[in-house]
């Protein structure tokens, strides 16, 4: 069979669980919004600005990496700015063939110009509604669910958890916690996680990206996370390989696999932050061979210069994967989504399975 190309993958339906709204802006949009709010940028044309974001995220310097978000968040402080970014996010994902996406952002980062938390969520939700309607009119239907993120280093997780639950019937499908892992364990936010569990709500936690097994263990066993944001360092609890016939899982890795806890892996982002040495050496190959509940995600499309189709194309190239693996990853993601079971099943049965049946021939 001929190798699968990027343009083939664009046409296949895909599901995305881990994508940051403030990490996926179009460079042209940043330029236009920044001019309106007089925010200075490191480059003055779209191409140079896009390249600056990727280079800064690639630099290995945490300061430069964080600086990239200072520029995107700066232009997302008004209702019009938030609406536009969300609308374009839905359109861009739909154009890439994504049929289901969970997009996350931290409302507390968008209050600098006086918006309330509710006004931020309303503006983003309205942007997604408009973007999804336009995408459907163009013949590229997409469903977007929102995750509200609380920042690890801050003290607003309870408030953001309550905000997420308040909007659960208005577009918000889950909660997340993000930010630097070292020194800010998820157990600092136990009250919020216990509240969410009492409310029968869903949440994922960024864990096991830079910080390793203790943060994964806390996210699962102390906080009760439904999914792991990244979770890539789970491989530190695996010895041997399936190919060598000597693969063995530690207690934590075995628990995560037994319980089918989804891993939101983000290959390019993991390479940029040093959580994986390269795509070819990314633990996703081993985690796939061991049949963990693996999903592929973009994390920050702007900073990684990537898309869902590109991430999948890179994996096909690195691991020799084909449509069977892409189908497995897509169904894994859809099974792990935070929307109701019957709605997940409808997307799997009516959209994903028929499309991949044709591709698999
Ligand atoms: Zn992330």
Image (spheres, rainbow, N blue to C red):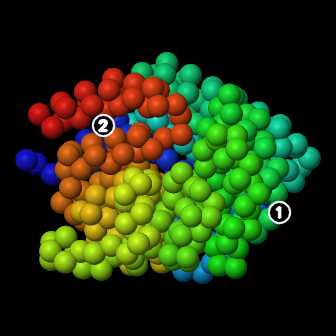
Residue located 40% across and 25% down the image: 346
Residue 201 picture location, percent across and down: 64, 41
Give the camera-side residue of 122 and 65: 122
The circle on residue 345 is none
Give the spatial CA distance, label 1 vs label 2: 41 Å
- 216 left or right of 336? right
- 103 left or right of 196? left
| Helix, strand or loop status at disc 1 | loop
* Image position of 237 with respect to 15: above or below: below
Looking at the image, do the residues carrying marks 1 and 2 touch, with CB atoms under 8 Å apart? no
Asked whether residue 329 appears in the rendered view, the answer is yes
Residue 211 picture location, percent across and down: 56, 77
Residue 339 picture location, percent across and down: 53, 34
The circle on residue 155 is 1
Q: Which residue is mark 2?
A: 12
Give the camera-side residue of 117 and 304: 117
Asked whether residue 50 appears in the rendered view, the answer is no
Q: Residues within 10 Å of mark 2 (few under 14, many from 20)?
A: many
- The image quarter containing residue 254 is bottom left
């Amino acid at each position: 069979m001929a190798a699968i190309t990027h343009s083939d993958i664009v046409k296949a339906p895909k599901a995305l669980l881990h994508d940051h709204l403030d990490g996926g802006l179009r460079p042209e949009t940043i330029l236009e919004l920044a001019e309106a709010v007089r925010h200075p940028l490191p480059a003055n044309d779209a191409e140079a600005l896009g390249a600056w974001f990727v280079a800064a995220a690639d630099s290995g310097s945490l300061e430069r990496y964080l600086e990239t978000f200072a520029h995107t968040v700066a232009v997302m402080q008004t209702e019009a700015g938030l609406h536009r970014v969300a609308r374009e996010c839905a359109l861009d994902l739909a154009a890439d063939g994504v049929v289901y996406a969970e997009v996350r952002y931290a409302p507390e980062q968008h209050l600098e110009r006086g918006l309330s938390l509710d006004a931020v969520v309303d503006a983003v939700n309205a942007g997604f509604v408009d973007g999804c309607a336009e995408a459907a009119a163009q013949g590229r239907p997409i469903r977007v669910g929102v995750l509200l993120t609380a920042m690890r280093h801050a003290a607003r997780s309870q408030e953001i958890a309550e905000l997420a639950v308040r909007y659960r019937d208005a577009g918000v499908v889950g909660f997340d916690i993000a930010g630097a892992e070292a020194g800010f364990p998820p157990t600092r936010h136990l009250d919020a996680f216990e509240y969410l569990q009492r409310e029968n709500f869903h949440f994922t936690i960024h864990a096991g990206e830079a910080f390793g097994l203790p943060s994964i263990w806390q996210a699962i066993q102390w906080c009760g996370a439904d999914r792991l944001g990244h979770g890539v360092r789970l491989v530190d609890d695996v010895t041997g390989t399936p190919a060598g016939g000597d693969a063995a899982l530690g207690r934590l890795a075995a628990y995560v696999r037994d319980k089918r806890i989804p891993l939101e892996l983000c290959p390019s982002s993991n390479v940029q932050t040093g959580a994986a040495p390269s795509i070819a050496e990314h633990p996703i190959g081993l985690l796939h061979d061991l049949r963990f509940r693996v999903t592929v995600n973009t994390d920050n499309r702007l900073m990684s210069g990537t898309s869902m189709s590109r991430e999948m194309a890179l994996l096909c190239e690195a691991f020799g994967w084909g449509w069977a693996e892409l189908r497995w990853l897509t169904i894994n993601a859809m099974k792990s989504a935070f929307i109701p079971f019957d709605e997940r099943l409808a997307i799997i049965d009516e959209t994903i399975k028929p499309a991949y049946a044709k591709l698999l021939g």
